Amino acid sequence: MTVSTQFIVARSDFQQAKFIETPLPARDELPEEGLLIKVDRFAFTANNITYAMLGDQLKYWQLFPAPDGFGNIPVWGFGEVIASRHPQVGEGEMLFGYFPMATHLVIEAADVSKRGLRDAAAHRQGVAPVYNAYARVSGDAAFAGRQGDYQALLRPLFMLSFLVDDALAEAEFFGARSVMLSSASSKTAFGLAHLLHTQRQPIRVIGLTSAANADFVASLGCYDEVVTYDRVDALAADRPVALVDMAGNAELRSRLHRHFGDRLVYSGRVGLTHQDAAGEDADLPGAAPTWFFAPDQIRKRAKEWGPGGIDKRFGAAWAGFAPKLERWIEVVDGRGPGTVEQIYRDTLGGRVAPHQGHMLSLAG
Ligand SMILES: NC(=O)c1ccc[n+]([C@@H]2O[C@H](COP(=O)([O-])OP(=O)(O)OC[C@H]3O[C@@H](n4cnc5c(N)ncnc54)[C@H](OP(=O)(O)O)[C@@H]3O)[C@@H](O)[C@H]2O)c1
């Protein structure tokens, strides 16, 4: 193959999407210490749509440059080194990390260690380090086959679940006796629900979801109560409650704040699955909504827990979560540009069943 295929979307209208082809560099055209990587497969969930929504604000668009007015949405997945100018990285190596929706990526390998490396390309700097880090996963059973698919689909999301659980527990839940999660059927939400349910009893976990997804949410067994969006006004409002908002819908948030009033003691914003054009209501009763910014909690815990402290605790949390995934998530493989575009459009339109996890490849 002499060209790389990329899937790009118009930054101002995500319905406009197209494929472009760019020439592939030969080995001697790679940057010094550069690697040419063939993108093997990647996960695609609502989180990737949120990357696009926040593409300008959080600089996601700058990671994988696209022609003017367009952006390449970042995805988590696997890539195989097919040409290398770095003496410590061989062809055939498998890397796990952040990739563009494309068949190939060139990176400038730096800080190469036994476990990983990072892309030092100038245009990728200025974002959190996690977005430029690649794990060397060849021969690691935890990243092979279906286990690898679960890692790509859930591990980056579960880091957020882990950090929110940790921050809430550290703050003693702001005095709340229960935690409500919107978009309870999302992978990020049920990762958090699992942690709260298994570690933080007697805190009650309440899942808010669409009618179509209520059965799935109830079947997970990690929510004490499941309530559809049209029924949130019927929730008991006599005890302090915390909200972790994956939906990002201003109307829902406003209803919850008005229903619980001062009993809503924490209102953390995490996601944008149901974002609408409605403006923010500046005058909500209860705790002021604030964005939960994961890198802040990571920095804080890295300092307090010392080297390896986060990895060790996160690894233990993942080990308790991963065995449940086969029961909860059906991995669906999709190959080729047509399928990738279809899953992109289904995810954008909220038409993906919550029990499905899509692993995609642009290669036919
Ligand atoms: N701040 C962070 O660092 C961070 C980290 C990880 C994830 N997140 C955010 O958490 C959210 C969930 O991500 P995920 O990848 O876990 O999601 P996912 O598993 O793909 O979630 C699917 C669920 O989200 C809701 N949804 C998705 N698209 C929708 C649409 N177009 N219209 C209506 N509902 C839609 C539906 O849930 P319901 O019917 O239950 O509402 C659907 O079942 C995303 O916004 C993501 O960016 C943020």
Image (tube, rainbow, N blue to C red):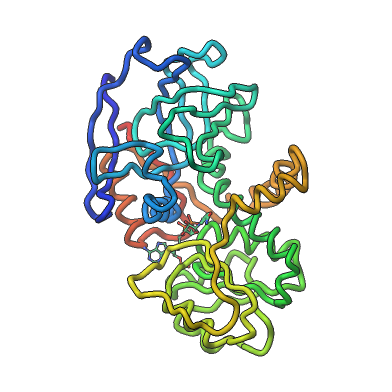
Question: How many numbered marks appear?
Answer: 0
- The x and y percentages for residue 219 are 57, 67
Residue placed at 55% from the left, 67% from the top? 290
Residue placed at 40% from the left, 25% from the top? 106
User: With 229 as the anchor, is 170 left or right in this view?
Assistant: right
Q: Nearer the viewer, residue 208 or 98?
A: 98
- The x and y percentages for residue 76 are 47, 41
Residue 107: name its quadrant: top left
In the image, residue 129 above or below residue 328: above
In the image, residue 26 above or below residue 99: above
In the image, residue 264 above or below residue 77: below
Specify the quadrant that holds the N terminus. top left
- The x and y percentages for residue 93 are 52, 21
Residue 192: name its quadrant: bottom right
- The x and y percentages for residue 200 are 75, 66
In the image, residue 176 above or below residue 46: below
Residue placed at 30% from the left, 54% from the top? 345
User: With 38 as the anchor, is 294 left or right in this view?
Assistant: right
